Image: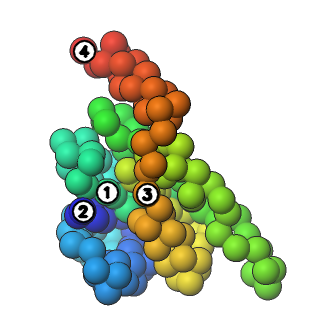
Amino acid sequence: MKVLFATDHAGFGLKEKLVPYVKELGYEVEDLGAFKYDENDDYPDSISKVAKEVSKNPNENKGIILGGSGQGEAIVANRFPNVRAIVFNGQCEEGTDMKVPNEIVISREHNDANIISLGARFLNEESAKEAVKLWLNTEFPKEERHMRRIAKITEITKSIHG
């Protein structure tokens, strides 16, 4: 599996920490930008690069995209066929003993999510690393009911895009 990264200015610093971390976990990594901090960049430019590659090969490529909240980035990614992007921005307060929510696991086990969009303004480095590791290590078990639902999403996408 190849893990593709992209970000805008809001997620640039966190991306720079996650890319080497994911390499250390043993994954093949490709960084598709941004390659420098530019407060005037537009997230669709970089995020669409990851979404395009995941769309072409959704079973072999996974994407990690970052932005301020992660919401706009997921919206862009989900425009591409075969992409199932989810948002994770933690929403856990400092000093609590809350762990990464189960939604990370469910996104893989139920939805076979192939892109995770991280809200860099809401996550610290440790929680982002924990979320990424959990997401990458959670397999899609291919249960019939989940495969049926994903197939329906694919058909809806085809009916819209042709």
Identify the disc placed on residue 1: 2
For marks 1 and 4 on the same chain, the one whose residue lies earlier in the sequence: 1
The one nearer the camera, 156 or 92, is 156
Q: Residue 6 placed where, x, y %?
A: 31, 63
Q: Which residue is mark 1?
A: 62
Could you tell me which quadrant the N terminus lies in?
bottom left
Q: Amino acid at mark 1?
A: Lys
Query: Colour scheme of this structure image?
Result: rainbow
Tell me the quarter of the picture where residue 46 sits: bottom left
Please state if 18 lies on the left or on the right of 120 as rendered. Answer: left
Q: Which residue is mark 4?
A: 162
For marks 1 and 2 on the same chain, the one whose residue lies earlier in the sequence: 2
* Residue contact at pointers 4 and 2, CB within 8 angstroms: no
For marks 4 and 2 on the same chain, the one whose residue lies earlier in the sequence: 2
Q: Amino acid at mark 4?
A: Gly
Label 3: element kind: loop
